[in-house]
Every structure is written in C-alpha cells, then in structure tokens.
Amino acid sequence: FNYKIKFINNNIYILGNINNYIDDNLNLEAKNKGLARSDIVIFQFDLDFNEVNHNLLGGKLNESITDVEVCDQVIYIIGKKDQETGGDLGYGGLDSNSIFIAKLDDNLEFENYIVLDKKFNVENFFSYNSNLYLSTNTNLYSFSKKLIFLDNLKYPEIVKYSHLTEDSELIGLSQTKGYVYDINKMEVIDFFSYPDGFDFGEINFFEELDNSVLCEYDDYLVLLDIVKMKDSHISDIYTKDKEIIDVSTIFGKCTLIRKEEEYYFDPLVCGKYPFSYFMETRDGLEFSFTNTQLIPLETNVIENGVYPIGYNLRFTGKAYLNDEIVINNYPLNIVGNYKLVLLDNNNTEKVIKFSVSEYQRQICDFYQDYYQYEINKGEDLELNIVVENIEDDFVGLYVNEKLYDISSVKKEENLIAIKVNDFKNLGYHCFYVEKLIYKRNEVLYEDKIDKYFYVKVNPVLPIFELEIDEENSLIIGVEDADNCLRLIRLYLYNNNFEYYFDYPIHNNSIIINNVNIDQIYNFNMKIGYYTGSEIKYSEEIIAGKIHLKESELIFGNINLLNNYETI
C-alpha cells in the first residue's frame, strides 16, 4: 500500500491506504467495522519496531490519504472521500467526491475532521506557526489546530505545484509564471518568469529536494531551483555540472554517488542527452534512474542589440547568419543588420535580429574572472610593484614592452609605482611587467619581474539632461562618451504585480502589453549601458503613476538622433 512515515515522541507512525487485505486479522477487522474498498490504515511502533497500536478508518466506498502533516506533535491527515462514503467520515450526501482534513487523537481515531465540498487538486499541505495550510490548484486555505477555517487566498492562475521555502514563503508554479506568496498576510508579494520555450502546462513533478524540485517534462529532466527562481526571476535547467547531493525518495534520504552521460555529451551542442543518476540509501542500497538532459539554444546577442565591429558571436546548436551557416566564435567584422537563426537537433528554431555599428565602441573580448584593479575610463592607474632593495635609484619599469617612469616610492612598504593611462578600450586589459631598471653606483641594472596584472576598465557613466519640448515630448539628452548605451528599462509595479520592459535604443515604440489591467501602477524608467562585462542601469530618469485600463498601451516613442546624443 502507499504510505507516509512520521516520527513523533519516540514513536514511529506509518499511515497509508489499503484496498487489498491480505492479512486475515486486518480483513476480519475491516469486515467487523463495515469497511470496504479503499480504506486508511495507521500503525504505531516503538523504537524497536514493536507494534504499539493500529487502526483502520474509512467507510463502505473509497477513502484515501493524500498527505500527512505534524503540527505541534499532533498528526493531521488530508485525503479524499467518496461522496456517499459513510463510516468514519460521515454519511456524505455531497455533490461529488471531496477532500477531508482530519486530526488524530492518541488512540489513532479521528478526534475531529472537516469535509471540503469543493472540486480541486491538493498541491501542498503544511503547517506554519501552529496553523495548517492547504494549497490547492486554485486557492490557499488556512485553518487553526482545531480545524477552524481562518482565511482564503484565490490564486491569480491555476497552480501546478507549490513549495514552502525555508523563508516560509510559498512558491506557486503556474503554467505561465511562478508566484511568491506571504502566508502570514495571505497575499502575492512577487512573481517570476520561466525559461524561454518552456510550457509548464504538461509538467510532471516527481522528486522534491530542500529548496528545489526535480521534474520530468517532455522526456527530459528539469531542476527547478526554487530559491534562485524567486531571487533572480529565472529557472535553472539541469546541466552536466549541477550538483545534487541528497534526494528524498521512497527509500528515504539518498546520496548521489555519480552521474554518467553518454560519451558524445557536448555542452556546446544543444539538444537532449541521456544521463543516469546513481543513488545510495543510508542502508547502502544502490539504485539508479535514467533520463535525458537539455542543452538549450543560447547566444551572446539579444534581440535588437547593437554590437561593435569585431564582436565574436557565440551560440549553441547550428547557426545561420543572414542565411549562411557560421561556426562558433564567429567574428562580426562587417557593419549592417543581421538575422541569426539557431536550430537544435530537432530543428526547433530561434530567431534573433541584431546589428553591428561602426559607432559602437569596441569592447575587449578577453574574459578574465580575476582582476587586481578596476578603474573608470579616463582615470590613471597606479600600478604597485614590490621590490627587495628600496634604496636603489629606480629608473623605470618595462610594461608591455614600454618603459614607464617611476611615479612614486613607498619605502615603508617596499613599493614602487608607475602611472598607466593607455586604456583605449573598455573591458579587461592585461599588463605584463617584464623587468625593473635601476641604477646603483652609476651603473644600470635590471631585475626580471615577470608578472601579469589584470585591469577592468569601466566606461564613463552617461550624463542625462531632461527637457520638455513644445509638443510636450520628453527629450532625454545623453552625454555618452563611450557609446555604451544599450536599452531603456521601464519598471511597472504595485503591491500585487511587477513587470520589467526592456526596449532597444533605436527607432521604436514603448508598448506595454500582457499585464493585469484596471490597476494603478507606479513606474520608473532607467537607461541600461554596457560596462564591458555586464549591463548596469542609471538612476531613475523619470517616475510616476499610471492607471492601465487597456491590455496594450503605447507609452511613448524612442527616437535616436546624432549617434546616441538624444533619445
């Protein structure tokens, strides 16, 4: 039979459903109580697995346990009952099969129970602050320990799965997006989007971890990192390097021993690849299950993005650039508009349009995770070098085959320094300090230094000026010395919803759509610019309130004049 195990006050409780009485004693007991079909069975054992008590509960038709929760050392059961069940859960007379919640006493009898005459799917049953919560596919209900109804929250969308985080926030996963609920206030406090191309209408969940869920979707495995989804508004797809240590299974907590992929696994080639989990229980039992993993279509350009000459195009899958096939790390050396078509192994297509401009400043294509210095473009860099004999007469340092004069000497720290200002490009720069030239007794000497230094150069921050013209249009004047403007971000929010809209900086309209209408929203607008390694945002350019009464609204227009000088 299907069962749940709970450990309370040095006792082990096994609660489950039974519909085939093989044991003669249990069969006789069921007949004497007038039970039939599917029933509820509960066993209580001590720590030596000696039976302390047991009980059969149900009626003449079908009763079953869906989940079990312990609240303040008391067991609560949630389950399904037939509309005319009779027996321990009343005589019915309901319109349809229903959900019940029952509280067990010390004799494993129902001390109290309630029947919910509603049609819904139970997604989660949990306790918090001595109250019980029932998450269905449509609502979140709260009850006291005495099973008295307290509150009810209707979900914005049908919930496919719900999960209580360590922060006591409830995550509800719907078909189009995920929502975050405050269970104390019984209200929506946040939401997040799913990865592109995912339709969660047909998803099957089968393993729950502490803060994430393994689920099966379209024949491949997806790892939903609940905390990451909430914090960064993006779901995490299982990859070759994803670490999963403990998984809850029917055998209890199991440890991942190893993962095995097919020999042809290649993270640069998108598609579905077979892999296997090899698990071990706490008792040493080994088992495995096999599934497929997804490498999604990805690229380092975005829709309507503008990139400099020489930018290297990276992607997964097969790529056609303006109808011609290209290889990975393809250099974009020609100014113009491009259409990128990505194809996976099943010929699923992803289309992105972008452009290469001669006015877009070249970004250094060197990626270095570790760097010693970070400066803004136009600033001088003071490069410090440790020397052994600080009393020498220093002449200069050879850096990148160029001799630099010594700018300062710090005797107490045994440091000498040079000033470097050769930063024509943004991004990461590498400096090779080859040797030190010094003079001793009027004789020139050189010491080999042989060290590398990495410098991250950020752009000069854009400066914005606002002006209202005669036609009441807002003119945003921008001084952008490094031509790093990328997008305009519009942020729309109120107590229940929030939306981000990113618009490329070229001829375009700011259109708001696919939002909940008949709402008053706060809004602000920021400018996004590229630093050579990431997108950063300016302070608020404008802010205000807006009442959306239509599902689509043209908020304004973006007109680009004189190469990023005016938006």
Image (cartoon, rainbow, N blue to C red):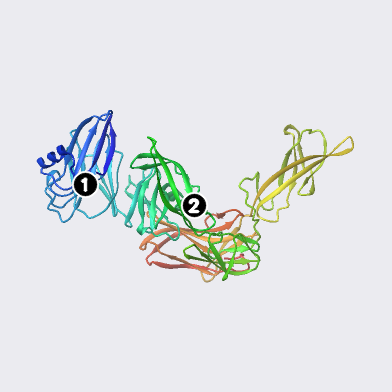
The residue closer to the viewer here, 95 or 233, is: 95
> In the picture provided, is 214 more to the left or to the right than 314?
left
Give the x, y percent position of residue 304: 54, 65
The residue closer to the viewer here, 395 or 550, is: 395
Which residue in the rendered view is the most extreme toward the top? 48
Give the x, y percent position of residue 372: 65, 43
SS state under label 2: loop
> In the picture provided, is 205 more to the left or to the right than 462?
left
SS state under label 1: strand
Characterize the local packing of mark 2: few (<14), some (14-19) or many (20 or more) Cα atoms within 10 angstroms.
few
Give the total number of marks visible in the rendering: 2
Image quadrant where residue 323 sits: bottom right
- Amino acid type at mark 1: Ser
**Mark 1 vs mark 2: which is more N-terminal?**
1
Q: Which residue is mark 1?
A: 64
| Residues marked 1 and 2 touching at CB (< 8 Å) | no
Q: Which mark is residue 262?
A: 2
Q: Which mark is residue 19?
A: none
Query: Considering only vertical position in the picture, is 486 above or below 129?
Result: below
> In the picture provided, is 25 more to the left or to the right than 290?
left
Give the x, y percent position of residue 419: 74, 46
Give the x, y percent position of residue 248: 37, 42
Q: Where is the C terminus found, in terms of image quarters?
A: bottom right
Q: Going 60% across and 69% down the picture, which residue do you hit? A: 561
Q: Where is the N terminus found, in terms of image quarters?
A: top left
- Amino acid type at mark 2: Glu
Gap in angstroms between the C-alphas marked 1 and 2: 42 Å
Asked whether the viewer can see residue 525, the reply is no
